Amino acid sequence: MLVVTGIFDNGRFIPDTQISIPQKRKVTVTIEETHDIETRPPNKWREIGEALRNCDEQLPGSPLPVQFRTVAEMEAL
């Protein structure tokens, strides 16, 4: 099952992302009554990403490498 979100505007459904639906495919449409486009919270992840990209703060020290457990270590747990 594929779930597609978007908005219904002026008689048309506009998905949040581009999708391809095969012709004559049976679909089910669910209308959310509580989330109008005007009342949706802003995309905070996009704001966070932009803030990180535009940040020029220099962090002290060197980053530590990440060490993942091996399969043997995981099996020993």
Image (cartoon, grey):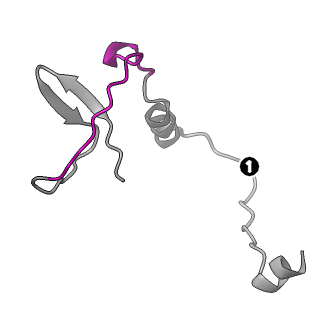
Of residues 28 and 32, the one drawn nearer to the viewer in this rendering: 28
Task: Using the image, determine if residue 9 lies above or below residue 38.
Answer: below
The stretch in magenta equals 25-41
Instruction: State which quarter of the image contains the C terminus.
Output: bottom right
Quarter-of-image position of residue 32: top left
Residue 36 lies in the magenta-colored region: yes
- Circle 1: residue type: Pro
Does residue 46 appear to the left or right of 58 in the view shown? left
The picture quadrant where one finds residue 5 is top left
Farthest residue, direction bottom? 72
Q: Position of residue 47 (x, y in %)?
A: 46, 31
Residue in the image at 45% along x and 21% along y = 41
For the point 42% across and 16% down, which residue is it? 34
Q: Residue at x 49, y 36 (%)?
A: 45
| Front residue (pair 23, 68) | 23
- Closer to the camera, 40 or 58? 40
Q: Which residue is mark 1?
A: 60
Expressed as whole percent of the image width and height from the top left, the position of residue 7 reads: 26, 27
Decide whether residue 40 is among the magenta residues: yes
Residue 13 point in image, percent of width and height: 18, 31
Question: At 73% across and 60% down in the image, what residue appears?
Answer: 62
SS under mark 1 = loop
Q: Sort mark 1 into few (<14), some (14-19) or many (20+) by Cα contacts within 10 Å.
A: few
Q: Main secondary structure of the magenta part?
A: loop
